[in-house]
Image: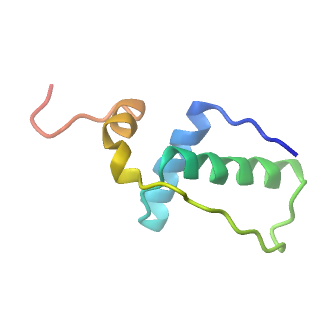
């Protein structure tokens, strides 16, 4: 089964995991967590099932992309 997730869902997942788990996901890792959430909400997966998600990249490699997507500015920027 293939699942498509939007860029908005991907970066919302990046933000959620960073805020609640302290993990800065890469966009490709966040695509997996966003797809997982989507499958849970559709009832395709059950919360009691064991699922393994792989974060294959480092979010630190994408700080500029993540900051831009979340409309974040560096301290001192206007």
Residue 24 in percent (x, y) is at: 42, 57
Seen in the picture, residue 13 relative to 50 is either above or below; the reply is above
Seen in the picture, residue 67 relative to 32 is either above or below; the reply is above
Image quadrant occupied by the C terminus:
top left
- Residue 73 found in image quarter: top left
Q: Which residue is painted at 48% across and 54% down in the image?
A: 57
Residue at the limit of the structure toward the top, as seen here: 78
- Residue 50 found in image quarter: bottom right
Seen in the picture, residue 12 relative to 17 is either above or below; the reply is above
Viewer-nearest residue: 49 or 61 = 61
Q: Is residue 66 left or right of residue 46?
A: left
Q: Which residue is painted at 80% across and 68% down in the image?
A: 47
Q: Is residue 76 left or right of residue 32?
A: left
Viewer-nearest residue: 51 or 15 = 51
Seen in the picture, residue 46 relative to 29 is either above or below; the reply is below
Residue 33 in percent (x, y) is at: 64, 54
Residue 53 in percent (x, y) is at: 66, 63
Q: Which residue is painted at 73% across and 54% down in the image?
A: 36
- Residue 76 found in image quarter: top left
Residue at the limit of the structure toward the front, as seen here: 56
Q: Which residue is painted at 37% across and 43% down in the image?
A: 62
């Amino acid at each position: 089964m293939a699942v498509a997730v939007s860029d908005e869902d991907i970066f919302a997942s990046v933000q959620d995991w960073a805020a609640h788990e302290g993990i800065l996901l890469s966009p490709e890792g966040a695509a997996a967590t966003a797809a997982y959430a989507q499958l849970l909400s559709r009832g395709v997966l059950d919360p009691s099932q064991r699922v393994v998600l792989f974060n294959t990249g480092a979010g630190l490699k994408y700080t500029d992309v993540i900051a831009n997507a979340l409309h974040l500015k560096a301290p001192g920027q206007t």
